[in-house]
Image (tube, rainbow, N blue to C red):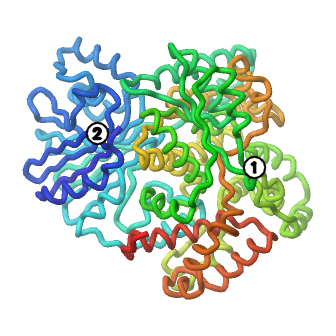
Amino acid sequence: MCGICGFVGLHDGALLSRMTQRLVHRGPDDEGSYLEGTTGLAMRRLSIIDLTGGHQPIANEDGTVRIIFNGEIYNYRELREALIAKGHTFTTHSDTEVIVHLYEEYGDACVERLRGMFAFALWDARQEQLLLARDRLGIKPLYYLVHHGALLFASELKALLEYDGLQKTIDPRALASFLTFLYIPSPGTILTGVRKLPPAHLLRYRKGELSLRSYWRPGFPNERERRRLLRRHPRDIADELKSLVTESVRAHLISDVPLGVFLSGGLDSGSIAALMARESSGPIDTFTIGYGEEAASYNELDAARTVARHIGSNHHEEIVTPDVMGLLPKLVWHLDEPFADSSLIPTYLVSASARRHVTVALTGIGGDELFGGYPRYLGARLAAGYSRLPMWARRTLAGLADRVPESTGSRNAAGWVKRFLKSGPLSPRERYLSWISFYDERGLHALLAPPMQAAVGDTASLWDAHRQWYDHPDALAILDRVFSVDVQGYLADDLLMLGDKMSMAASLELRVPYCDHRLLEYAASIPAEVKVRGLTLKALFRDAIRELIPSEILHRDKQGFMVPIGQWLNRELKPLVRELLSEGAILKRGYFNPAEVSRLLKEHESGRRNLSDQIFALLVLELWHRIYLDGERW
């Protein structure tokens, strides 16, 4: 695992050094660089595989191809053997060198043979070409900037900020996207001119010319294939799925350093832990965090202990009372961009806890998207029947929805009901997009100050990428469409991004077996009605893992990886809220209507509405602005 950075079109060793130093937390074990003419490549390494021989950059036999690489290639041994049979000579046993020779053999198509998580930069001196690549699901991040004929890239945005030519100007549409989704979808970033390489994309930069191409996207079965799969016995499909999950976990255990697993007590992490225990010669290490009595409803300690006892793991748990006021600025710095999924806090805390014992941890990210685990998936199915009500009835109920009281507890069922009713008059596509949004067009218009409204322009187009994902030409069922949206949006740009940034903040490598592209392709091929049976979420997955985990866990209701952010905003974080979101601060920044911000704060404090996500987003944005653009120290 590494942090990578570099450029073409510049000759500035001091800049390369500064960029590299910004990434020390991603790779505390080693550093390497290459600077020749106007090409610079550099990396910081967290040593996982081939501890003594994996120093980067790594070159081919004659030094004409060099690579810096962040990630893990799980099929590198098979690829290595095949390349040796073709006459390639290896000098290390690392997975990084495999990519060099794979490129020599297959060119850009080398990425299609890689199984794993990766972001890499490959310099081909003969072609005078830089190739940037990112894995299929976007597990590893990669930012880039083109300026005055030069291209700069880095694993994290903060490294690009070392370049004096980068103007720290906020992109208004990215800001509006952040408020809408709580993250900024690829390829956008918060800064004008800086882009994220989208998942499953290659970037070629040659003599000042840039080209992008996608090399993969999830597919779905056609009607003939659906009918064939529906004729199969569900037990056979479940057994097949179990075999694939087992094989993916086994592949993700490749390491020359200790591994562990985040254990929440749910189906996803519990099954990974159970399979990992079966594949290991001794007890594995599992890690869980919990909260005190004031936030007991957010705890999963008992469920995690049940799984840990069942599999016989060395279980580590911490009851945390985090100094949120002190911790939040640090996490905002590590995130690079405004990011307001509050699960970033427990992700960092469990990563820091695990790093005291292991260097690599597996996690259950992706299980809900692949196997149908979110309550909103049931909502999408139920909405088909609800849409048969007359439009006047749905509009009436939507108008009454605001009267439903909400909760700041871990299960805000009233909030789900409210969202369902308010979206009743919408089309199926727009209804689902409203469920995964935190502001609609009207809400954004009320929040944004007039100059910012003008700069943002057409707010309806903020959802365009999500609409295209929903309208996937091969997706026949509604649940296939929402799978397409969630995998390409929420999973890639929210869950995987926060997983990478928060684990790397603790210098821990995080692995995601459910995000193996082979497993995802299989999950996408299964008809939605097999994955979600009636009102049972993850029905097929439960059948597949039935023998792995205790029955009380198998039938336990889903609980997200959450923190009591609603309570913290009214207590621990209240002084910070009052300072950063005061009328004076809002007016000084000029982005928002201070009266609307004040209204949101009052409604949340009164308990009438749970506006935790919206307020946390405003708080994070102001904090990010002060750290990154104003240069304040916290």
Q: Secondary structure at mark 1?
A: helix
- In the picture, measured across the screen, residue 401 lies left or right of residue 3, that is right
How many neighbours does mark 2 have within 10 angstroms: few (below 14), some (14-19), or many (20 or more)? some
| x then y, percent, for residue 308 | 65, 26
Quarter of the image with the C terminus is bottom left
Image quadrant assignment for residue 177: bottom right
Which quadrant of the rendered structure holds the N terminus? top left
Identify the residue shown where x is 67% and y is 29%: 223
Residue 233 higher or lower than 257, as above or below: above
Q: Residue 470 has which mark? A: none
> In the figure, 152 relative to 248: above or below?
below
Q: Which mark is residue 296?
A: 1
Q: Identify the amino acid type marked 1.
A: Ala
Measured from the top left, where is residue 428 in percent x and y?
74, 52
* Residue 507 visible in the displayed image: yes
Q: Give x and y (percent) for residue 215.
A: 40, 38
Q: Residues within 10 Å of mark 1 (few under 14, many from 20)?
A: some
In the image, 106 versus 41, the foreground residue is 41
Callout 2: SS: loop
Q: Is residue 520 visible?
A: no
Q: Amino acid at mark 2?
A: Asp
Q: Residue 192 occupies which quadrant of the picture? A: bottom left
Q: Earlier in the sequence, mark 2 or mark 1?
A: 2
- The residue under the point 26% across, 54% down is 21
Q: Is residue 284 left or right of residue 410?
A: left
In front: 211, or 267?
267
The residue singled out by tag 2 in the image is 29
User: Residue at the spot x=32%, y=46% of the render?
Assistant: 3
